[in-house]
Image (cartoon, rainbow, N blue to C red):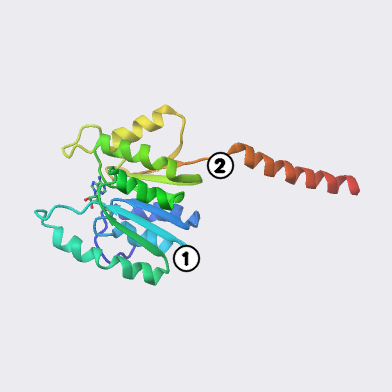
Amino acid sequence: MNTPVPVLQNEDELERVYQVFLDRKPTKTLEIGSMYGGTLYHWLNGTKPGGLVVSVDLMIPQSDPRYQQVAESRQLWQGWAEVARVELSQNDGDSHDPLLINLAEHYAPYDVIFIDGDHSLRGVTADFENYWPMVKPGGLMIFHDISCPDVNEYQIGSGTFWRELVSKGVYVTSSIENTPAAWGFGLIFKPEPISEKFGADVKAVERRTKKGKSK
Ligand SMILES: C[S@@+](CC[C@H](N)C(=O)[O-])C[C@H]1O[C@@H](n2cnc3c(N)ncnc32)[C@H](O)[C@@H]1O
């Protein structure tokens, strides 16, 4: 996939998750953790024209050797949004900060929320708890780095979080994981309210049976 800035993803996994994203024809997307904007670029291009993409991203510290390139990349984002004819709400801050949570809530509900910010176990769990209510019924939340083993040198807790969540057995989940040793996307689908779906089905059955009687 062509991306104008570095994208911190396994190329094949990204292509597969992007296809899932496109199939949902999202009009509102939220990304936590954008860095250079590699995934953000694709969400902007895959969100319906006229739609909205919200980015919440904590800038890396100036001491980080990637700082300059990240700062320059961030200058490109509004231009990408204009070309894609999508509104971009670009927010520098900590996803756990109540101000940022309120800001994201202001635009909710979202068709898709992608979580790729604070990868500590506490961080990713807090993002799930704070942002899952903002996924619309029938929508999707995607986590990155779910293939990470429990014990790893960077203290990444996304894999542990994911395995705990799946083991509860109460969420509708699937994963995109290249083996061996790729990074992995975890997908959680929020069901539509059952009563509404059933109501629609009953009307369809009634229409069919009335037709049947009049013949
Ligand atoms: C792995 S990078 C994102 C990569 C990007 N999604 C991509 O695939 O190209 C993680 C980003 O999340 C940011 N981040 C870390 N903790 C965060 C937090 N609590 N809230 C928001 N962003 C955070 C980091 O500074 C960094 O910019």
Mark 1 surroundings: few (<14), some (14-19) or many (≥20) residues within 10 A: few
Marks 2 and 1 in Cβ contact (< 8 Å): no
Mark 2 surroundings: few (<14), some (14-19) or many (≥20) residues within 10 A: few
- Residue found at the far left of this picture: 63
Front position among marks 2 and 1:
1
- Residue found at the far right of this picture: 215
Q: Earlier in the sequence, mark 2 or mark 1?
A: 1
- On the image, the x and y values in percent for residue 191 come to 53, 40
- On the image, the x and y values in percent for residue 183 come to 29, 45
- Residue found at the far top of this picture: 168
**Foreground of the two, 66 or 9:** 66
The answer to whether residue 13 of the structure is visible from this angle is no
Q: Amino acid at mark 2?
A: Glu
Residue hosting label 2: 192
**Foreground of the two, 179 or 73:** 73
CA–CA distance between discs 2 and 1? 24 Å
Circle on res. 88: none
Residue 6 versus residue 129 in the image, above or below: below
Q: Secondary structure at mark 2?
A: loop
